[in-house]
Image (cartoon, rainbow, N blue to C red):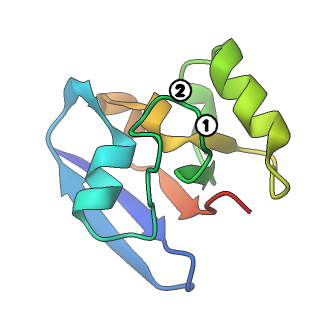
């Protein structure tokens, strides 16, 4: 079981847990858990509404591909640790992470 700490856009925090499943992504879990993640493009790295900041252990994640980098560079609230949750598969690399939901701006 993977456990992460999530801070939503309103500042509320809670721990969530889920099973590893590389064919699913973090955006799907955040949406199911009712965090402020509209996911307008459906996980295609095209809208930025699933923008998060990875607050710890970011080095455990794969590097962003060109599509994710392009979208992140266009977001006004880009910061160190910024990632698109739709591009993060549900793998053990997420276990123990703390993230903050940022949205698209």
Question: Which residue is pictured at 38% across the width and 46% down the height?
Answer: 27
Residue 49 visible at all: yes
Pick out the residue farthest to the front.
41
At which x and y percent is residue 65?
63, 14
Tell me which residue sits at (57%, 63%) in the image. Answer: 100
Res 103 → quadrant: bottom right
Residue 61: image tag:
2
Occupied quadrant, residue 17: bottom left
| Depth check, front residue: 46 or 8 | 46
Q: Is residue 93 above or below residue 98?
A: above
Q: CA separation, marks 2 and 1?
A: 6 Å
Q: Nearer the viewer, residue 18 or 37?
A: 37
* Proximity of marks 2 and 1: CB atoms separated by less than 8 Å: yes
- Tell me which residue sits at (55%, 31%) in the image: 45
Within 10 Å of the Cα at label 2, are there few (<14), some (14-19), or many (20+) other Cα atoms? some
Disc 1 packing (10 Å; few <14; some 14–19; many ≥20): some
Q: Secondary structure at mark 2?
A: loop
Instruction: Report the quarter where the C terminus lies.
Output: bottom right
| Foreground residue among 79 and 93 | 79
Where is residue 80 shown, x and y percent of the image?
Answer: 80, 46
Give the labeled residue for mark 1: 58
Left or right: 14 with respect to 97? Answer: left
Q: Nearer the viewer, residue 38 or 12?
A: 38
User: On the rendered structure, is 53 left or right of 43?
Assistant: right
Give the quadrant of residue 84: top right
Is residue 64 among the parts visible in the rendering?
Answer: no
Quarter of the figure that contains the N terminus: top left
Please state if 51 lies on the left or on the right of 20 as rendered. Answer: right
SS for tag 1?
helix
Where is residue 48? Give x, y as percent.
62, 46
């Amino acid at each position: 079981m993977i456990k992460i700490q999530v801070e939503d856009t309103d500042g509320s925090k809670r721990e969530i847990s889920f099973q590893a499943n590389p064919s699913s992504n973090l955006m799907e879990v955040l949406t199911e858990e009712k965090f402020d993640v509209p996911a307008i493009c459906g996980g295609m790295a095209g809208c930025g509404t699933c923008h998060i900041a990875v607050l710890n252990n970011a080095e455990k994640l794969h590097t962003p591909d060109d599509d994710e980098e392009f979208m992140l560079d266009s977001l006004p609230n880009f910061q160190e640790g910024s990632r698109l949750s739709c591009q993060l598969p549900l793998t053990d690399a997420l276990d123990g992470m703390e993230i903050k939901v940022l949205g698209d701006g």
